[in-house]
Amino acid sequence: KQGGRLEEGDGDTAGFVPPSIVPQDVKVKEENKRQQQQLQHEQQQQSESQLLFKYYGIRLFGTSITWLLWDIAFYGNKLFQSTFLLALTGENATLTQISGASAINAFVALLGYYAAALIVDKPTIGRLRLQQTGFVITGTLFLICGFLSEHLSSTTLVIIYLGSSFFGQCGPNCTTFLIPAEVFPTEMRTVCHGISASAGKLGALIASILFTSAKTDN
């Protein structure tokens, strides 16, 4: 027919409605549907977070606080290792002696890490027991170095210090990042591991501030 009207069933143009004349109520419905889907997604995420803290909050606190405490000791130790070695070996120690003690300390720490790799999967030991034992032994050796330094010889103090490096690696420095990777649901494992690691980096910052302040005061 003439006049520009479409014939019924006229090929691809039949039923075509230009976007400019789509009813406004259809656009509103589509926008409301999109907002509703977004709201449901946000509520689902919030629900997952609530369930995580409800059922795994204690685990998250445990993995975070242990990583934080270990990094306070670990980074405080490593950032000021030369100061500690000088205090342990004596003020008259030469640069060669201090460098030698530092190299031996690094080697002993490496042995501790390999020892952890060998025993961490044994059923009689496992991650938790290895971490607990490492914390206790390392903490005890640090306390001995701190409180009995005036009553022990330099050689004894260096041996104790090397022991703390070994059991620190064969213990917390290995398990603090292994445990968070295994004790949380798969869906939230990355988030929880990141929170725990962030707590550890906070511990490193605290160690840097505290030990720098203590060194300045002395």
Image: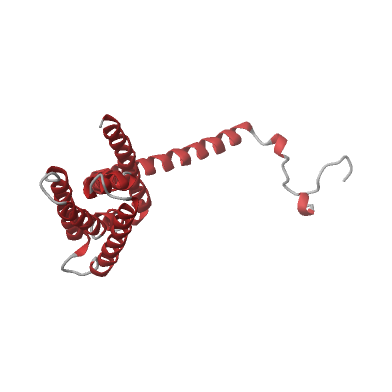
Instruction: Give the image's coloring scheme.
Output: secondary structure
170 versus 3 height, above or below = below
* Residue 48 in view of the camera: no
Q: Image check: 172 left or right of 4?
A: left
Q: Residue at x 81, y 48 (%)?
A: 7
Residue farthest to the top?
217
Q: Position of residue 56 (x, y in %)?
A: 25, 48
- Quadrant housing residue 73: top left
Q: Residue at x 21, y 46 (%)?
A: 58
158 or 75, which is in the foreground? 158
* Residue 99 in view of the camera: yes
37 or 172, which is in the foreground? 172
Q: Image check: 163 left or right of 80?
A: left
Q: Position of residue 10 (x, y in %)?
A: 79, 52
Q: Image check: 18 left or right of 43?
A: right
Q: Residue at x 19, y 60 (%)?
A: 130
23 or 208, which is in the foreground? 208
Q: Residue at x 72, y 47 (%)?
A: 15
Total marks shown come to 0
Q: Position of residue 183 (x, y in %)?
A: 27, 56
Q: Position of residue 217 (x, y in %)?
A: 26, 29
Q: Quadrant of the C terminus?
A: top left
Residue farthest to the right?
2
